[in-house]
Image (cartoon, rainbow, N blue to C red):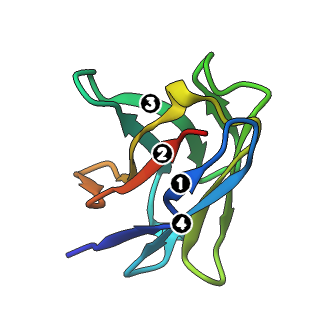
């Protein structure tokens, strides 16, 4: 019913920046919230950033001050701007759409932070 496709992952040096994009197959206006999650090898999946339909945002402690989540309703996208990247940010990043009835996940995009 809903498809989410992430893009923008890749290899970046520590201290560098990267922008991840998530495009939805329908208007993101219909979602209660959208979020970016990540899962590092051997680790649990964790919430990185969340944006609600009202535009409020929240971040994991590890992302505060470095990451910014923002949406573009015209393009049906939710992006995650990541600055001052650290090796511990290396993970597969997933886009998630939250609705009252169900949630939807993208297939993920790999971010590798290494020198």
Q: Which residue is mark 1?
A: 11
**Foreground disc of the pair 3, 1:** 1
**Foreground disc of the pair 2, 4:** 2
Give the image location of residue 82, x and y in percent: 68, 45
Q: Residues within 10 Å of mark 2 (few under 14, many from 20)?
A: many
Residue at 48% of width from left, 51% of height from top? 34
> Going by the image, does 90 lie left or right of 87?
left
**Residue 69 or 12: which is nearer the viewer?**
12
Q: Which element carries disc 2, helix, strand or loop? A: strand
Q: Which residue is mark 3?
A: 47
Give the image location of residue 84, x and y in percent: 76, 35
> Going by the image, does 2 lie left or right of 65?
left
Distance in Å between CA atoms under marks 1 and 2: 5 Å
**Foreground disc of the pair 3, 4:** 4
Give the image location of residue 41, x and y in percent: 27, 30
Do the CB atoms of the residues marked 1 and 2 lie less than 8 Å apart? yes
Q: Which residue is mark 4?
A: 8
Q: Which residue is mark 2?
A: 112
Please tell me which of labels 1 and 2 falls first in the chain: 1
**Residue 71 or 12: which is nearer the viewer?**
12
């Amino acid at each position: 019913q809903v498809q989410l496709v992430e893009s923008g992952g890749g290899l970046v040096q520590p201290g560098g920046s990267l922008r991840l994009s998530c495009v939805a197959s329908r208007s993101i206006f219909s979602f209660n919230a959208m979020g970016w999650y990540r899962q590092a090898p051997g680790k649990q999946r964790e919430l990185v950033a969340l944006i609600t339909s009202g535009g409020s945002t929240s971040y994991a402690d590890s992302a505060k001050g470095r990451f910014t989540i923002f949406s573009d309703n015209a393009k049906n996208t939710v992006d995650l701007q990541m600055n001052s990247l650290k090796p511990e940010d290396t993970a597969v990043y997933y886009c998630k759409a939250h609705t009252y009835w169900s949630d939807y996940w993208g297939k993920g995009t790999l971010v590798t932070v290494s020198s």
